[in-house]
Every structure is written in C-alpha cells, then in structure tokens.
Amino acid sequence: MTAMQILYWLAVLGVFSGLFWLGSSKGVTLWVRVLTALVVGILFGFVFGDLVESTKWVGDLFVRLIRMLVVPLIFTTLVAGLLSMGDPKKLGSIGGKAMALYMMTTAIAICIGLFLGVLFQPGVGVELATVSTREIQPAADVVERFLGIIPTNPVAALAEGDVLAIIVFALLFGTGIVMAGEKGRAVGDAISAAAEAMLKVAHIVMELAPYGVFALVAWVAGTLGTETIFKLLTLVVVVYTACILHAGLVYGGLIKVLLKLPAVRFFRGIIDAQAVAYSTASSSATLPVTMTCVEENLGVKQSVASSVLPLGATINMDGTALYLGVVAVFSAQAFGIDLVAMDYVMIAVTVTLASIGTAGVPSASLFLLSTILPVIGISVEQTALIVGLILPIDRILDMARTAVNVSGDAAVAVVVAKLEGELDEDKFREVAAV
Ligand code: ASP
C-alpha cells in the first residue's frame, strides 16, 4: 500500500465514522445523510482520482443488497396491496390512470428533449473522426417481448427477476386468493405479513445507503474521463437542464397545480430514492427505495404504490425518453442531417417505444439508439460511432436520467393515489421534519 492509499482509506474511514455518528448520536434523518454522502463522495472522487476504485466494492455491496429486495418486495407487496384494495376491480382503474399519466409525462419529456436539443445544438461541430465504434446489439423482437409478460413458469420469472412477468403472476395470484374467500385467507394473511417484514428489511438496507452512495459517486467522479466531458459539455448541460426542467415543471406542476399539494414536500420525500437512483443509475435496483419513500414519506397506500411503482420502474422512463430525444437531435447535427417536422414525429414515436422497452439498468438506453437513429436516416455504422462517442460519459448522463425516471414513477403514484382516494395527505404534508 502506498502512502496515498493509506491516506485515502483513513479519509474514507473518517467519512464513514462521521456518517455513522450523524445517524446514531445526532439522529440526523436518512435523506440528509444520503445527500451529505453524495456531495462528499463527488469531492472525494475529484480529490483522490483513481484511488476511489478501491472502495467501489462498498457501493457494489449496497447495490446487491437493494437488488436482493426487488423480487420478494414486488411479489409480496403487490399481492398484499391487491388484498387490501378490497375490490380487485379497483386495480383496473388504478392501472388505467397510471398508464395514461405515464404516457402523458413521457410525451412531454420527449418534447422537452427535442426542444432543448434544437435550441442548444449540442451536436454541431462534434469531432467524430477519432472515435472508435462500438458493437450494438439488434433490437429485441416486439412480439416476443410482449408474450414474455406472461410467465410460462412463475418460479423462473421470480428467479430471473422478470418484473413484468412477476406483476402478472402476482396480480392473478392475488385475485385467486380473493376469489377463494375464507379458504384463501391463510395464504393472504401470510403474504401480507411477509410484505410487512420485507419493508422492515428494506429499512435495514437503507441504513447503509449513505455509505453505498458515497462509494458509488466517488467512483464515478474519480474515474470519469474529464477530457471527454469537456468535448461533449454542451450535451451534458442540455441533458441535465432537460432533466431539471422536466422534474420541476411536470412533476412539480402535477403535485402543485393538479393536486394542490406542496411540491417541495414531494421532492423532499423522494430524495433518498433520487440519490440512490443517481448513484446506481438503475431504476430497477432503486425500486425498493422508491417504494418505501412513496409509502412512508408521501402517504401513498400500499395498494397503489405496490402496483404503480413496479410497472413504472419497467415501462415509464421519462429521463430516458428526454435523453434519447436529445441524442437523436445531437446525432443528426453531428452528421449534418436536416430534420423536418415528420422526422421529429418519427423520433417521438420510436423514443416512446424504446423508453418502454428499456431495462432499468445502467446504460440500457444508449444501446437502444440502434432502433431510433435509423428512422432519421442514420446508418448502423454511424450509430455505432455515436454510441462510441457517448459511452465514456454515459454514466453521468445515466445518473441524471435515472433519477428522473424514478421521480416520474413516484409522481404518478402520488397522483393516482390522490385520484383514487388512497393518499394520506397528512402524512404527505408531514415529510418536512429533519
Ligand atoms: N439506467 C436507466 C434506468 O435504469 C435506463 C437508461 O439507460 O436510460 O432507469
């Protein structure tokens, strides 16, 4: 170990002890600790550079722990949520409203992405000559994806963490329990009890969030190619601006104008989920955190949170949609292609489909560019160039779009809960306490 490595580890131990002390002795709320860890982590990355590689495992450990929760949490809370609804028909109304809101917010996201892309022209003058191409995989077959929603073997779906298939099975199973009446009660009670226990496990894991978030953001900040960032600075600024605008205007607007509730409370209530999404760049992994935030900080009842959020984590990706819109315009500018009105419509349609089909894992959407760029006349080779150009900095773009993806799911859950009379408004307004 070099002196620098020893110094780094001592500094990290200092930060971890500080975070622990804030929580245990000072009783500082989790979101403040998570946010502190995020800021300190970024500073550490810039100060210590490559040394941050040695603590990345702490972040990976945290990601494994939250991913461990995803399948049992979705299954048990979805069945328990359905049982608590009383009337399974209510599910149709919840699902319909959620889908409509998901589509609407995604459409706005694409418009914001396209608009800012055209306004700031991030692709004009981009140097592509020195970029090496990246292999891109062909798009998955749509019919196959659709059929895959029905699991032929639910146990395999659970084992593979196939969220949509788990949702379908859990909903049918929950409906079966209701239909079985008295005879099904025992299993219903057992699953509801398991859901309670899983939420407690989520609490335990979330106590480790500050350490995981610290290690992950330090790793990103310390290993990022700053040179590439400067080359693509306009793209980074446009994507971040679009993300902030979308979250502030659309989610803030929905909460404030439509629901007449304080938007600040909403953002404060989901800050843990945003920080975890930002540091992990995976909305699937963040799902357990989103669920606990939305239920416990924002007062959304389990019946809504357990159905709307897993669906959203899989198909609703506003941050991804706006990012893909910006990148499509960026690519056209880089290759000197003039876009006409019809091109924007085509981009919007394919981006909507791509954002639905994107998996909630890091960099998933970057590799879906192969399904979008051809509609505006960009060849496979050119697409591979664009992917090669963006890949080195995709993580920082991914962090922002994932935070927006997760915020969008939470906003829709709050709106649906309010419309369905399943929102505990007192709890929502309480969120302030630090
Ligand atoms: N990383 C994003 C997510 O998990 C998906 C994407 O690549 O846009 O939400």
Image: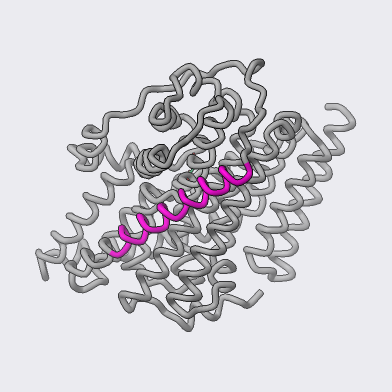
Which residue is drawn at the image coordinates 78% and 51% (left, top)? 15
Q: Is residue 318 visible?
A: yes
**Extent of the magenta region:** 97-120
Which residue is drawn at the image coordinates 63% and 28% (left, top)? 392
Residue 212: within the magenta? no
Identify the image quadrant of the N terminus. top right
Q: Quadrant of residue 373?
A: top left
Residue 239, image x, y percentages: 59, 45
Tell me: residue 296, above or below residue 218. Answer: below
Residue 64, image x, y percentages: 51, 42
Q: Is residue 358 visible?
A: no
Tell me: residue 195, above or below residue 415. Answer: above
Q: Nearer the viewer, residue 141 or 353?
A: 353
Residue 102: within the magenta? yes
Which residue is drawn at the image coordinates 63% and 77% (left, top)? 433
Q: Is 86 displayed left or right of 319 in the figure?
A: left
Residue 193, image x, y percentages: 33, 65
Magenta region's main secondary structure?
helix
Kindly give the residue lying farthest to the right in the view shown. 3
Residue 51, image x, y percentages: 78, 32
Identify the image quadrant of the C terminus. bottom right
Q: Quadrant of residue 219?
A: top right
Q: Nearer the viewer, residue 420 or 61?
A: 420
Q: Nearer the viewer, residue 72 or 86?
A: 86
Which residue is drawn at the image coordinates 70% and 38% (left, top)? 233
